[in-house]
Amino acid sequence: MKNFLSPFDADETLKLAIHASEHGDTHSAIRYLTELLNIQPDHGAACYFLAMQYAEIGLFERAITTLQHAVEINPTFDIAQFQLGLLYLQTQQTLEAEQIFSGLSLSSHDPALTAFSLGYLALFKEQIPNAIHHFQEGIAVCSNDALSNDIKRVIAQVENAAQNSSFPKLNNQDIAHSNHFTEPQNEQTSTTNEHKTLTGFLGAYLDTIDEDNGPH
């Protein structure tokens, strides 16, 4: 069994969790983060990263609960709010997602997340050109390549759906998932022309965590 660090080494524990995740060892990453949060339950970065690990293995409701706690710790943790909005979409909670993106569009300190949130709000209204415009605005000012690349894939999916006249109405009953996380088998579909909703790709985007939300 691996030896985990003492509770006094919070910063190092977080670094080990990130290292484990980057090498595909989600189980160890969750162990490290859980240990850290047992000692420092208000460690915002650890909550955020733990939520991403839960999402990676398909535990979406647990990921949502953990992200909600991260936002409670720091209401200005914008990337955590953005990911929470994407997870609400992933779990067909469209109204909750709309509330998150609406709030970010008005209050985010990150111009990229403001624009991306406006893009999703436009998608909710099926305003495809406006959505693409906002997404492209966000990419232009986004300093995180992973996040930018994921939004570029969202744009490609939106454009493809529009060209095929298959863009969905966004509601809680008609939603499918389009991201790189594992989906439960009962949520997958074999119908190739089923409407799809663009929920993003939910990478951890650690480079977007500022000093206030980072290790402390």
Image: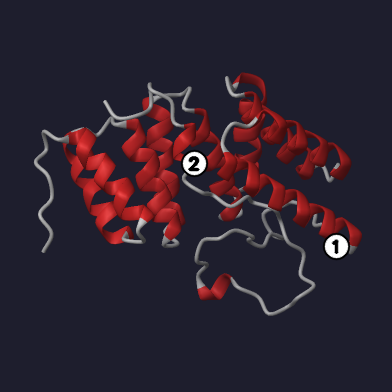
Residue 100 occupies which quadrant of the picture? top right
Q: CA distance from mark 1 to mark 2?
A: 30 Å
Residue at 80% across / 40% down in the picture? 131
Q: Indicate the amino acid at tag 2.
A: Tyr
Q: How is the image coloured?
A: secondary structure
**Mark 1 sits on what residue?**
166
Label ID, residue 107: none
Answer with mark 1 or mark 2, whichever residue precedes in sequence. Answer: 1
Judging depth in this view, the residue of 129 and 141 nearest the camera is: 141
Q: Residue 8: where, in percent of width, then height?
A: 11, 33
Judging depth in this view, the residue of 97 and 127 nearest the camera is: 127
**Outermost bottom residue:** 190
Left or right, 159 with respect to 108, comes to right
Judging depth in this view, the residue of 124 and 139 nearest the camera is: 139
Residue at 28% across / 30% down in the picture? 42
Left or right, 87 with respect to 94, comes to left
Q: Tag 1: Cα neighbours inside 10 Å, few (<14), some, or many (≥20)?
A: some
Judging depth in this view, the residue of 17 and 55 nearest the camera is: 17
Eyeballing the image, is 178 above or below 216? below
Q: Indicate the amino acid at tag 1.
A: Ser
Residue at 33% across / 59% down in the picture? 26
Q: From the image, which quarter does the C terminus lie in?
A: top left
Residue 123 occupies which quadrant of the picture? top right
Element at label 2: loop
Left or right, 71 with respect to 86, comes to left
Eyeballing the image, is 189 above or below 8? below
Element at label 1: loop
Label ID, residue 205: 2
Q: Residue 152: where, in percent of width, then height?
A: 71, 47
Q: From the image, which quarter does the N terminus lie in?
A: bottom left
Q: Residue 110: where, in percent of width, then height?
A: 59, 24
